[in-house]
């Protein structure tokens, strides 16, 4: 076995070990350990991606060399390695970008707890991406949920505790539905390993056994993970969770956590059930409809938002709608567009949340729009970063968001004719709405008149770590926009490996 094939397992175990080792450490020591671990995970993920892209084949890593059902398996292909790479980089830059704010708003005695939660969260994200076992996926979904809830409530304020409670309630509903679906699936197949389950399901479909229970399983797992990822109308927890958490938490939650559940759903569709069976079940049509509704309703809510954090949070609802709309097209091209948009959203939303914190710092820690007047002149780097992120979400060429929308439009042209026209119309309307709320904010932060007196004298000097994070996220946006062809080729290859 090539040594690089150990890296997915090393990444997961390293993050879990860092969480344990950080427990007795002081806050700053835990910070350096977490940043080091996340950086190492990024390096190992890049090495894994290079290896599987070069070989053109996925590989399975058997934990402890014990075969199923006694052992556990990790599977790494092009898509898993690509997602792990982007997730690790976004995690690193989100932490660096929000570090100053984190130390300002979190009690010093809880700083090390924050980094313990981050370590566990990254471990769960990687395990969800790489796992080849359904129950292991569920276990790490729950670790993911608990860690994310801790990142929301770490400030200890009334609003953050309320937001964490709402998040936990909705997440537990989703987790419960997902667990019921796994129990039913194990009952009719006798397996939890993804390949074994898929083989059993193909046999059941061919013999027309347990078709109704299988449809129930597909429905429960889809709805459960849709609730956890914030698909409209299961989005009510998102504005407060993102609005009252520390900046780094908001960036991580919006950019990574919600997307990890969609990644798990895609794995179930392809590697557990089989995408042909999923299409025949018509569940993709339901996702398509709710994705379209989410694209519009999330944008309308963002236009009505009164502060910059709520606006970005509601925008996330619309962007999740884009992903589910792409999945709902039920084609290889639609799935490619959906996965590419997961990467786009991870990079861009983290950029927006981190830069928004810089703008609010330059406005006396006020998030409401009147206080943000001219904020880009008081914090030029944050203003430039927010401008790039906004233009990307609107779909301006050379940026990641443009490629996402181009891929969605192209996929719509090759999809079911009944879906083509409605997709193109909603895509156009959503783009116009994106422009309304993002460019409205950009115009306000770059308008040098009518600046409130209490913020006129503020001028922010961005620290080196935050500046590096903003610049790196801007560059990643341009990389996705200008080098999209190699990335979409990797996504195509990864989906083919799934299929």
Image: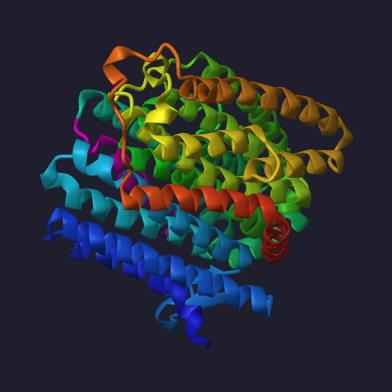
Give the total number of marks visible in the rendering.
0
Q: Quarter of the image holding residue 65?
A: bottom left
Asked if residue 140 shows in the view, the reply is: no
In the rendered image, the quadrant that contains the C terminus is bottom right
Out of 72 and 19, give the one closest to the viewer. Answer: 19
Residue furthest to the bottom in view is: 1
Q: Is 379 contained in the magenta span? A: no
Here the colouring is: rainbow
For residue 329, above or below residue 132: above
Residue furthest to the top in view is: 450
Residue at (81%, 43%) from the top-left corner? 410
x and y, in percent, of residue 315 in the image: 54, 29
Query: In this image, 284 relative to 176: left or right?
Result: right
For residue 93, above or below residue 215: below
Asked if residue 428 shows in the view, the reply is: yes
For residue 115, above or below residue 16: above
Magenta span: 135-156
Out of 456 and 405, give the one closest to the viewer. Answer: 456
- Specify the principal SS of the magenta part: helix
Residue at (65%, 36%) from the top-left corner? 322
x and y, in percent, of residue 294 in the image: 61, 26
x and y, in percent, of residue 368 in the image: 38, 17
Query: In this image, 17 relative to 408: left or right?
Result: left
Query: In this image, 420 relative to 136: left or right?
Result: right
Residue at (41%, 67%) from the top-left corner? 41
Out of 198 and 327, give the one closest to the viewer. Answer: 327
Residue furthest to the right in view is: 417
Q: Is 150 contained in the magenta span? A: yes
Out of 61 and 15, give the one closest to the viewer. Answer: 15
């Amino acid at each position: 076995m090539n040594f690089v094939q150990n890296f997915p397992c090393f990444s997961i175990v390293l993050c879990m070990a860092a969480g344990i080792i950080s427990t007795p450490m002081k806050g700053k020591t835990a910070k350096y350990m977490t940043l080091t671990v996340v950086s190492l995970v990024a390096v190992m993920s890049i090495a894994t991606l290079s290896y599987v892209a070069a070989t053109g084949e996925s590989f399975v890593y058997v934990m402890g060399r014990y075969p199923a059902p006694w052992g556990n398996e990790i599977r790494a292909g092009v898509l898993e390695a690509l997602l792990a790479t982007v997730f690790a980089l976004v995690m690193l830059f989100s932490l660096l970008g929000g570090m100053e704010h984190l130390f300002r708003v979190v009690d010093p005695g809880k700083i090390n707890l924050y980094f313990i939660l981050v370590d566990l969260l990254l471990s769960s994200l990687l395990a969800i991406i790489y796992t080849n076992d359904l129950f292991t996926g569920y276990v790490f979904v729950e670790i993911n949920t608990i860690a994310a809830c801790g990142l929301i409530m770490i400030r200890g304020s009334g609003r953050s505790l309320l937001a964490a409670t709402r998040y936990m309630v909705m997440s537990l509903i989703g987790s419960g539905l997902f667990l019921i679906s796994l129990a039913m699936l194990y009952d009719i197949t006798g397996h939890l390993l993804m390949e074994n389950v898929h083989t059993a399901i193909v046999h059941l479909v061919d013999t027309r056994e347990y078709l109704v229970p299988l449809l129930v399983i597909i429905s429960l797992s889809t709805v459960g993970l849709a609730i956890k990822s914030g698909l409209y109308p299961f989005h009510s927890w998102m504005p407060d969770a993102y609005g009252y958490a520390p900046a780094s938490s908001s960036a991580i939650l919006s950019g990574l956590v919600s997307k990890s559940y969609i990644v798990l759903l895609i794995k179930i569709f392809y590697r557990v059930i089989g995408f042909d069976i999923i299409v025949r079940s018509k569940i993709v049509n339901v996702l398509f409809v709710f994705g379209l509704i989410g694209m519009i309703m999330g944008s309308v809510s963002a236009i009505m938002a009164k502060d910059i954090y709520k606006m970005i949070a509601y925008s996330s609802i619309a962007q999740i709608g884009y992903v589910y709309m792409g999945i709902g097209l039920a084609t290889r091209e639609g799935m490619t567009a959906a996965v590419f948009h997961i990467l786009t959203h991870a990079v861009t939303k983290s950029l927006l949340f981190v830069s928004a914190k810089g703008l609010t710092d330059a406005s006396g820690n006020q998030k409401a729009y009147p206080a943000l007047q001219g904020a880009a002149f008081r914090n030029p780097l944050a203003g430039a970063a927010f401008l790039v992120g906004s233009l990307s979400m609107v779909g301006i060429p050379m940026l990641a968001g443009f490629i996402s929308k181009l891929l969605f439009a192209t996929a719509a042209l090759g999809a079911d004719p009944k879906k083509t026209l409605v997709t193109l119309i909603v895509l156009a309307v959503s783009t116009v709405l994106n422009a309304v709320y993002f460019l409205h904010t950009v115009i306000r932060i770059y308008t040098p008149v009518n600046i409130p007196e209490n913020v006129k004298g503020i001028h922010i000097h961005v620290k080196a770590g935050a500046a590096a994070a903003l610049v790196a996220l801007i560059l990643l946006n341009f990389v996705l926009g200008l080098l999209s062809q190699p990335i979409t080729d990797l996504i195509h290859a990864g989906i083919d490996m799934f299929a």
